[in-house]
Amino acid sequence: MSAVAQTSNAAPEASSRELMLSVRGVETFYGKIQALRGVDIDVYAGEIVTLIGANGAGKSTLMMTICGNPQARSGEILYRGDDITRLPTHDIMSRSIAQSPEGRRIFPRMTVMENLQMGALLEDPKHFDADLNKVFELFPRLKERRNQRGGTLSGGEQQMLAIGRALMSRPKLLLLDEPSLGLAPIIVKQIFSAISELNRSEGLTVFLVEQNAFHALRLAHRGYVMVNGRITMSGTGRELLSREEVRSAYLEGGAH
Amino acid sequence: MEYFLQQLINGITLGSIYGLIAIGYTMVYGIIGMINFAHGEVFMIGAFIALTSFLALAALGITFLPLVLLIILAVAMIFTALWGWTIERVAYRPLRGSFRLAPLITAIGMSIFLQNFVQITQGARVKPLPPQIQGGITLMDSPSGIVVQLSWMQLIIIVMTVVLMTAFSLIIGKTSLGRQQRACEQDRKMASLLGVNVDRTISLTFVMGAGLAAVAGTMYLLYYGVIDFYIGFIAGVKAFTAAVLGGIGSLPGAMLGGLAIGLIETFWSGYFSVEYKDVAAFSILAIVLIFLPSGLLGRPEVEKV
Ligand SMILES: Nc1ncnc2c1ncn2[C@@H]1O[C@H](COP(=O)(O)OP(=O)(O)OP(=O)(O)O)[C@@H](O)[C@H]1O
Ligand SMILES: [Mg+2]
């Protein structure tokens, strides 16, 4: 836990950093249903930013809209100054963005190794061995299971694989959708400290969606709160943690 | 015994041709969940391209047989692959994401269109090709007078099929392209999140299936010596049956299914009657599907993901 607390203290000077991801006035629809209603979010290089909100608020929709599936109907998404709003997903991902999506989406009939190879698709093959070792160091469990099929892993192992797979592309911006879902507290701790470690040692920028608001806000430099497809609050992790509205809505009984 | 062996050789040959076509059905089904009913016609077009290029080479005075075979095979594969790519591009891709039956109906339409197209441009009559590769190895020459022979043509077909299927299994199983195809098969959305160009991968799948169908078409032409615009329908139905029998979506299943259908058909005609050979093949399919609803090597639908 100490590692997590530390990063909250050492929030980088957002204003002096490169604006990595900028979401401006984004509206996304599923058919006639509007899921995002003018969302504005900024993520600066080197930050960990978290997005919290109730079920169905639109968090996963935002993550997927950033990756172009579904595409925003209006508004724009800038990645390092480039407009990526209308690009096909595979083009967006080739700009060193990686996502570990909601539901993990492990390829069930591929081995752990093959899943990781898929993650490294966009990366220079000469980095493969080094990256693989790093992922195995982070999640030794995956190394033991490397020839096992993805569909037969436990939920927690699948989650590790999903994150490991995302890291195999050497992302600059990592999008994580509920990495702690369904995991034992000790694994959650392990994953969160891995995230903060990657952020500190490699300057990895992380945009994190979490149900586990308490952990997420302590880990993150800044946070946003989403309600019904709109951003209703934003601030540093500490600020949000101390806000009464946040505590009552997302934290009651959660500060374990 | 001799008779049995001869039927076995004939059955394996026929099964090889079905297997090559069946792969196209099973791969396309695997990746976009659609039965490409026009695939039989792609096979037929492959045979026509092979014939046309053969006649062109003959007109040019190129008659050195190994060279001729190599060229017609290459030409057939390239142009048939182009057909496969085009069919997907014009007829199926625009419908992706629409209701499930739409591409199926289009595929049937495409199949009819291609048959008519070839009928009009090539004529409705059968096109003969004089036998090019004659002779073979006599495996057994029994006193009873029954000869067991493996013709060169049969040998070429079987060897070619084994080589292609091995190469194909390696591509799908071991290469990055194959992994991308399997990824699209299992979760297209996730594949694109990892940078896979899904549309391109699907196109390549059609191209590969059409290439194998072209090989089958060329072999069919050389083996039987006659083709017409209708061969795609019959062979297509058989190969489709083979794919379902083996377990649609499964690559080894398609090979096994092709072999099974080829053998059933040959043995049935050899021992019972030629007329009912198709009934035999379909009956066995029905029986297998009753006990193994997902085919011989198919995976059951229920799956923990
Ligand atoms: N594919 C879809 N088709 C139609 N509606 C959808 C689709 N996906 C999401 N929605 C709707 O959009 C809204 C936002 O969903 P989203 O998954 O983004 O919420 P979320 O904030 O991630 O929720 P959770 O915390 O439960 O994961 C919900 O009302 C949901 O029902
Ligand atoms: Mg969600």
Image: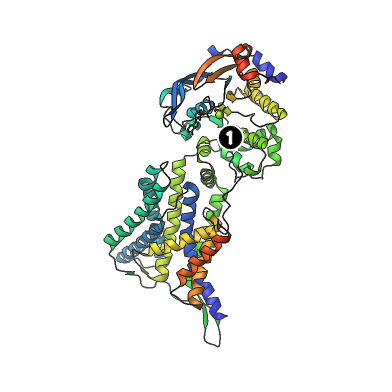
Element class at badge 1: loop
Q: How many residues crowd mark 1 within 10 Å: few (<14), some (14–19), many (20+)?
A: some
Front-lying residue, B123 or A20: B123
Residue B61 pos. (x, y %) = 32, 66
Q: What amino acid does circle 1 point to?
A: Gly
Quadrant placement of the C terminus of chain B:
top right
- In the image, residue A203 sits, relative to residue B304, either above or below, namely above
- In the image, residue B118 sits, relative to residue A29, either above or below, namely below
Q: Which residue is mark 1?
A: A103
Front-lying residue, A244 or B115: A244
At x 40%, y 71%, the residue is: B224
Residue B127 pos. (x, y %) = 32, 68
At x 45%, y 69%, the residue is: B278
Residue B279 pos. (x, y %) = 46, 69
- Along the horizontal axis of the image, is B34 left or right of A109? left
Q: Which residue is most to the bottom?
A: B143
Residue B250 falls in image quadrant: bottom right
- In the image, residue A227 sits, relative to residue A106, either above or below, namely above
Residue A44 appearing in the image: no
- In the image, residue B275 sits, relative to residue B176, either above or below, namely below
Residue B53 appearing in the image: yes
Residue B210 falls in image quadrant: bottom left
Residue A107 pos. (x, y %) = 58, 42
Indicate the chain on which mark 1 is placed: A
At x 32%, y 66%, the residue is: B58
